[in-house]
Image (spheres, grey):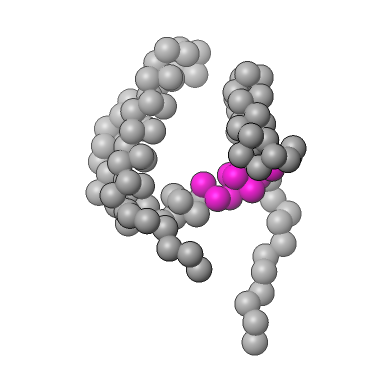
Amino acid sequence: MGERRETMCSEIRVRCTNSERKKWQDFAYRLSGEPNTFSYILRALLILLEHAEGDFGKMSPLVRALEKPPKNAPLQVALFEQKLAQILWESMRRSGRLERK
């Protein structure tokens, strides 16, 4: 019997500035050449995160040690997100190439 596919019926909301929203939309358009492809890119990023998940266990103490900044401190938020990005990048880099299914 074949694999049963889940129906996409759920949403994830992400709070961002208007300029960040535009950056996401512009990035998605530059990458795909089509409007409204953000959800595909977000799901592809989830595949990358799942691929690196084995290394995340090693990195989780670093993430947990980061102090989450108050939302009304933009510089602290930016620094926190940069540190988190560095940790995620290192995990993805060490997890190696993603093999095609």
- Counting from the top left corner in percent of width and height, residue 34 is at 73, 40
> Total label count?
0
One can see residue 85 in this view: yes
In the image: residue 93, left or right of residue 35: left
Question: 14 left or right of 73?
Answer: right
- Dominant secondary structure, magenta: helix
Q: Residue at x 39, y 16 (%)?
A: 76
Spot occupied by residue 56 in the image (x, y as percentages of width and height): 32, 49
> Could you say which is closer to the camera, residue 69 or residue 5?
5
Q: Residue at x 37, y 56 (%)?
A: 97
Compare residues 2 and 74 and report the one nearer the observer: 2
Q: Residue at x 71, y 56 (%)?
A: 8
Give the quadrant of residue 16: top right
Q: Is residue 53 visible?
A: no
| Percent coordinates x, y for residue 26 in the rendering | 65, 29
Is 12 in the magenta?
no
Q: Which residues are magenta?
A: 37-45
Left or right? Give the position of 49 relative to 10: left
Horizontal arrangement in the rendering, residue 75 relative to residue 34 (left or right) = left
Residue found at x 64% / y 48%: 40
Q: Quadrant of the N terminus?
A: bottom right
